Image (spheres, grey):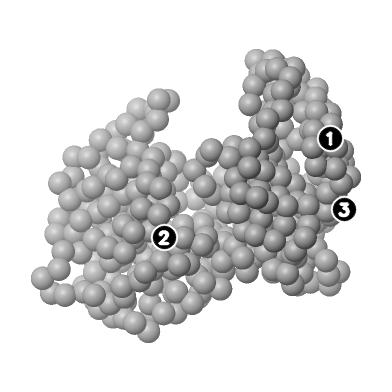
Amino acid sequence: MILEGKKILIFSPQPWNHISISKHHYAFELSEKNQVFFFSAPSGFGLSVNSSNINERLKVFDYQIPFPQSLRFKYDKLYKRTIQYFLKKIIIKEIGSTDICIDFGCDRFIQKLDFLDAKKKLYFRVDDSPDFKPSLRGADFILSVSMNIVEKYAAEGIECHYINHGLSTDFISQKRSLNTIKEDKIINAGYAGNMLIPHIDREMIIRTIVQNKHVNFHFFGVVQHPKMNDNQRQWIAALKSQPNVILHGVLPTDKLVLNFQYIDIFLLCYKSDSKSYHSDNSHKILEYLSTGKVIVSSWIRHYAGLELFPMCNENDNRDYADLFKKILNDLSYYNSDKLAQQRINYALNNSYKYNIQKIAAFIYVDNVNNEL
């Protein structure tokens, strides 16, 4: 089903100038055939509204409210009611009636979606957290990319539908070089993502690097932050100390896509913390798969049994370095054209554009399966 000619509000926990993630990609894709209006939390204390046009059908709003940020946690409910009051005024004045509202987990600044007059209200919960308590939040429909979140809702008797992550246009349209392994070629392994997140299995990554001195390990993503703690600094220092590690930092998406062309093996080695990350899915996997190249992974619930790439046993990364070496020793097979094409096809069938069609069918058709 095609979503077309609608006025769509998007509420995002991250601002527009954040590194592009699912909220930004959905906004772009939806704006191809709809008018999209993007809001995040207020940018500060004051009383102002500004908007900027990203394209002719995508407008981003920046607004301030007369509520001191220093008091937001002490008077949480009042803070949220104040935001909702001003958001409603902005929407009525600047946008008018709306067809669809999508809330990507803005619990920290929006109490409920009841204050909106949108015809369809969708709560799209992406990330789990220790303090997350499932509720309808004034929405008509609930989605998540995490089966763990779906099950939390089910335990409360609330229906939540599962949908996979999406693949952005940049990765769909990339040039691909498939099985180019030669005996004298230096092998490149790669990881993309914030290197400071706590659920990376740092010990296993370092062990894999140390045991494979003849492989170059490329890391793309955040490697420094003003508020880094000692553990994070030690982790980055350990990576920098390895002669076969290249830290590229954060790259624009187009340059990241270009660099992916030279990667032979992708890395994903996470460990569940039973609080925010449960090893159930990861958005970067579709980006990896879109290249066709093999992934050496810790156990990921969504992909278990799909046989798209090898992974460790559930909640057990002890053999990760051995698994990497096994794949490395038979790379021509694991990166064969047949296996590469299977990965590419899977990734392309999970594009944001295709996900939007599934979501449209979901919100405009009464009878749908639990998994979109």
Q: In this image, 242 relative to 76: left or right?
A: left
**Identity of the amino acid at label 1?**
Lys
| Structural crowding at the residue carrying mark 2, measured as other residues with C-alpha within 10 Å and reported as few (<14), some (14–19) or many (≥20) | many
Callout 2: SS: loop
Q: Residue furthest left?
A: 184
Identity of the residue drawn at 87% across and 53% down: 119
Image location (x, y in percent) of residue 308: 44, 74
Identity of the residue drawn at 27% across and 44% down: 247
Query: For mark 3, what is the residue?
Result: 119
Query: For mark 2, what is the residue?
Result: 298
Image location (x, y in percent) of residue 141: 80, 56
Distance of mark 3 from mark 2, alpha carbons? Answer: 42 Å
Above or below for 279 versus 325:
above
How many numbered marks does the figure carry? 3
Q: Earlier in the sequence, mark 3 or mark 1?
A: 1
Distance of mark 3 from mark 1, alpha carbons? Answer: 18 Å
**Identity of the amino acid at label 3?**
Lys
Query: For mark 1, what is the residue?
Result: 93
Distance of mark 2 from mark 1, alpha carbons? Answer: 49 Å
Callout 3: SS: loop
Q: In this image, 246 relative to 123: left or right?
A: left
Identity of the residue drawn at 80% across and 63% down: 363
Above or below for 323 versus 343:
above
